C-alpha cells in the first residue's frame, strides 16, 4: 500500500516537472517562430498607416468601439488595443482614442449595473467564471466598497492586472456617486493607457531577438495568469482589504 502511494506521488511529481519545462519550451518555440514575421510586419509602419487612413474617420471609431467592448465583455485585453493605437496613431492620439473608448465602456458598465442591479452583474460574472466565482466576487467587492470607498477603486484603476473592468460594475452596485467615480476611473486608467500607446509607438525599434523573447514571455504570462487568475486576483483583493 505504502509503495503504491509513493509510486503515485513520484508520477505526479514527474508530471509537474515535465509540465513546468514543456510549457515554457513550447512558448519559446512560438516566440522564435513568430518573432521574425512580427518584426517584418511592424517595420512597415508607413504602409500600414496609409492603409488605415483610407477608411477616414471610421478607423478611430473602430478602435473606440473595441475598447468599449473590452470593458463590457473583455474579448480582447485592453493593453493590446492600447499598443495597437499607439502604433497606428502615435502616443498622444493613440492614448486619446483608447481613453475615450475605455471611458465610454466604463460609463455603460456603471450605468447598467446601477439601472439593472445585482442580477445583471451576477449573470455577467457567471457567464465568464461560473456561479461560485460570481458569488465570491460580489461578496468581496461589496466589502471593499463599504470599507474603503473611492480609494480602493482608484488603486484598482491605477494598478495593472487588477480587474478594473469588473470594478466599474461594482461601482454601479455601490451607493457611490457615478459621476465622480467615472472621473476617478478616467484619471486612474490614464497612466496605463499612456504607457501602452508609448510601447506601440516604439514597436518597430526592438530587434528581432527581443520581439521573439517578448512574444514568448507574453504567451507564458498570459497562460500562467489565466491558469491561476482566481488566486492572483483574490490575493490582490485581500491586500486591498488590509
Image (cartoon, rainbow, N blue to C red):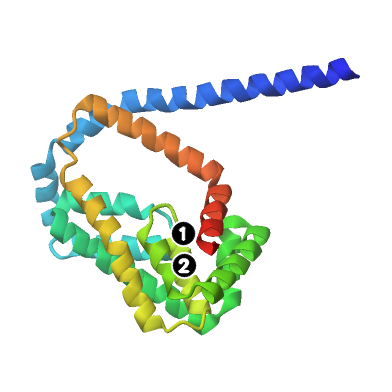
Task: Examine the image and state in which quarter residue 16 appears.
Answer: top right
- Mark 1, secondary structure of its residue: loop
Q: In this orientation, which residue lies closer to the viewer: 167 or 63?
A: 167
Instruction: Mark yes or no: residue 62 visible.
Output: no
In percent of width and height, residue 36 lies at 24, 26
Residue 167, which numbered label?
A: 2
Rounded to the nearest angstrom, the CA distance separating label 2 from label 1 is 6 Å
The residue located at (26%, 65%) in the rendering is: 99
> In which quadrant will I find the N terminus?
top right
Mark 1 highlights which residue?
163
The residue located at (22%, 63%) in the rendering is: 97
- Is 34 rendered above or below residue 196? above
In the image, farthest residue toward the right: 1
Q: Residues within 10 Å of mark 1 (few under 14, many from 20)?
A: some
In percent of width and height, residue 203 lies at 19, 40
- Is 83 rendered above or below residue 222? below
- Mark 2, secondary structure of its residue: helix
Q: Residues within 10 Å of mark 2 (few under 14, many from 20)?
A: many
Instruction: Mark yes or no: residue 172 visible.
Output: yes
Cβ atoms at labels 2 and 1 below 8 Å apart: yes
Relative to 67, is 142 on the left or the right?
right
Task: Examine the image and state in which quarter residue 10 appears.
Answer: top right
The residue located at (51%, 44%) in the rendering is: 226
In percent of width and height, residue 67 lies at 33, 62
Amino acid at each position: 500500500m505504502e509503495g503504491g502511494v509513493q509510486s503515485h506521488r513520484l508520477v505526479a511529481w514527474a508530471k509537474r516537472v515535465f509540465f513546468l519545462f514543456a510549457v515554457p519550451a513550447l512558448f519559446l518555440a512560438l516566440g522564435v517562430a513568430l518573432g521574425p514575421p512580427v518584426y517584418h510586419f511592424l517595420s512597415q509602419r508607413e504602409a500600414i498607416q496609409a492603409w488605415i487612413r483610407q477608411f477616414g474617420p471610421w478607423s478611430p471609431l473602430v478602435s473606440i468601439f473595441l475598447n468599449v467592448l473590452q470593458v463590457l465583455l473583455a474579448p480582447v485585453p485592453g493593453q493590446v488595443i492600447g499598443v495597437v493605437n499607439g502604433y497606428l496613431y502615435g502616443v498622444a492620439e493613440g492614448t486619446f482614442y483608447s481613453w475615450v473608448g475605455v471611458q465610454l465602456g466604463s460609463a455603460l458598465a456603471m450605468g447598467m449595473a446601477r439601472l439593472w442591479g445585482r442580477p445583471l452583474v451576477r449573470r455577467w460574472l457567471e457567464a465568464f467564471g461560473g456561479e461560485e466565482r460570481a458569488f465570491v466576487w460580489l461578496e468581496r467587492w461589496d466589502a471593499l466598497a463599504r470599507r474603503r470607498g473611492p480609494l480602493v477603486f482608484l488603486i484598482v484603476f491605477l494598478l495593472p492586472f487588477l480587474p478594473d473592468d469588473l470594478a466599474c460594475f461594482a461601482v454601479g452596485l455601490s451607493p457611490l456617486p457615478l459621476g465622480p467615480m467615472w472621473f476617478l476611473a478616467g484619471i486612474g486608467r490614464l497612466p496605463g493607457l499612456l504607457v501602452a500607446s508609448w510601447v506601440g509607438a516604439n514597436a518597430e525599434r526592438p530587434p528581432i531577438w527581443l520581439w521573439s523573447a517578448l512574444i514568448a514571455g507574453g504567451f507564458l504570462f498570459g497562460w500562467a495568469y489565466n491558469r491561476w487568475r482566481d488566486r492572483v486576483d483574490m490575493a490582490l483583493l485581500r491586500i486591498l482589504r488590509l
